[in-house]
């Protein structure tokens, strides 16, 4: 699928950023190998629509001031810490003849025998994978087939994944992506329940502490009255 955005050059990079946001535009910087960094602004609505679908792992055709589009990926989005609205964007311009690295989301499919028949619980250790490939081979997602998890000893590792042609994984191939945890026995569940009850029984509510303090104060006052007689 092809994603596209438009942008306009920004003359001033300081105070003008506030004016851009007030005009419902987002300040951005475009940079990359062999490309002069460009300060641009992108219509907010346009960016939000593309970002929801493309995320950080899809190529986007970016046309600046009506020029021929260049290939970019969204590298970073700085958001307001209160509203979580995007405040600034970093776009990395891509050379189609050079390999790139990207973090691709993992999509889990299939049924595990250890889960369905033996009552185990799926344990995911990763939800994205860093890969290397030419931009043209960049996958939007990587599928993880859970049907290979037949026992509690089975594990899906980075090296066991079936990656698309031209795509290789970065990092340790022995890193575990998913396993199935054995269900707790009745004895283990009983111990866990007793432990939880013990912890709860030791907790005093604020009301109980207040009553205890008032009772202690009343006792002190009564003792003082008796001593003064």
Image (cartoon, rainbow, N blue to C red):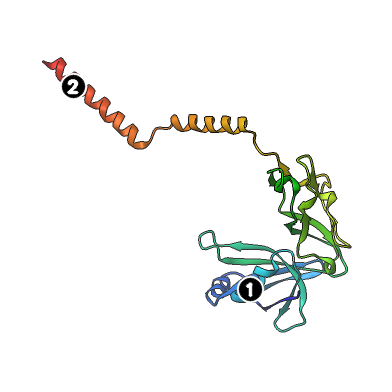
Q: Nearer the viewer, residue 220 or 70?
A: 220
Residue 30 versus residue 214: which sits nearer the camera? 214
Picture quarter containing residue 43?
Answer: bottom right
Q: Is residue 35 visible?
A: yes
Say whether disc 2 or disc 1 marks the residue closer to the N-terminus.
1
Q: Which mark is residue 49?
A: 1
Residues at marks 2 and 1 touching, judged by CB atoms closer than 8 Å: no
Q: Nearer the viewer, residue 83 or 14?
A: 83
Residue drawn at (23%, 22%) of the image = 220
Place of residue 51 in the rendered image (x, y in percent of width and height, measured from the top left): 66, 69
Q: Tell me if mark 1 has few (under 14), some (14-19) or many (20+) residues whose alpha carbon lies within 10 angstroms of its own.
A: few
Single out the residue that lies furthest toward the left. 229
Q: Is residue 124 visible in the rendered structure shown here?
A: no
Q: Pointer 2: residues within 10 angstroms few (<14), some, or many (20+)? A: few
Q: Position of residue 163 (x, y in %)?
A: 84, 58
Q: Identify the residue position indicated by label 2 in the image.
A: 222
Against 87, residue 212 (above or below) is: above
Q: Residue at x 63, y 76 (%)?
A: 46
Give SS at disc 2.
Answer: helix
Horizontal side of residue 30 vs 12, given as left or right: right
- The structure residue drawn at horizontal position 70% and vertical position 68%, both measured from the top left corner, is 54
Residue name at image x 81 percent, y 57 percent = 131
Measuring from the top left, give residue 40's x and y in whole percent.
Answer: 66, 74
Q: Quadrant of residue 105?
A: bottom right
Q: Nearer the viewer, residue 40 or 105?
A: 105
Q: Quadrant of the N terminus?
A: bottom right
Marking on residue 195: none
Q: CA distance from mark 2 to mark 1?
A: 72 Å
Q: Position of residue 218 (x, y in %)?
A: 22, 26
Image quadrant containing the C terminus: top left
């Amino acid at each position: 699928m092809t994603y596209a955005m438009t942008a306009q050059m920004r003359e001033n990079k300081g105070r003008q950023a506030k004016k851009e946001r007030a005009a419902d535009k987002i300040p951005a910087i475009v940079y990359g190998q062999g490309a002069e960094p460009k300060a641009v602004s992108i219509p907010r609505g346009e960016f939000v629509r593309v970002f929801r679908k493309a995320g950080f792992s899809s190529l986007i055709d970016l046309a600046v001031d009506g020029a021929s589009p260049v290939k970019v990926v969204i590298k970073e989005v700085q958001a307001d810490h209160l509203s979580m609205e995007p405040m600034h964007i970093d776009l990395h311009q891509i050379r189609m003849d050079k390999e790139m690295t990207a973090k691709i989301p993992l999509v889990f499919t299939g049924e595990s025998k250890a889960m369905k028949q033996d009552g185990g619980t799926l344990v995911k250790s990763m939800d994205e994978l860093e890969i290397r490939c030419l931009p043209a081979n960049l996958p939007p997602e990587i599928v993880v087939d859970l049907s290979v998890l037949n026992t509690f000893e089975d594990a899906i590792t980075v090296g066991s994944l079936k990656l698309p042609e031209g795509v290789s994984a970065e990092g340790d191939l022995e890193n575990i992506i998913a396993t199935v945890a054995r269900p707790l026995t009745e004895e283990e569940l009983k111990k866990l329940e007793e432990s939880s009850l013990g912890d709860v029984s030791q907790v005093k509510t604020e009301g109980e502490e207040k009553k205890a303090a008032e009772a202690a104060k009343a006792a002190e006052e009564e003792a003082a009255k008796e001593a003064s007689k």
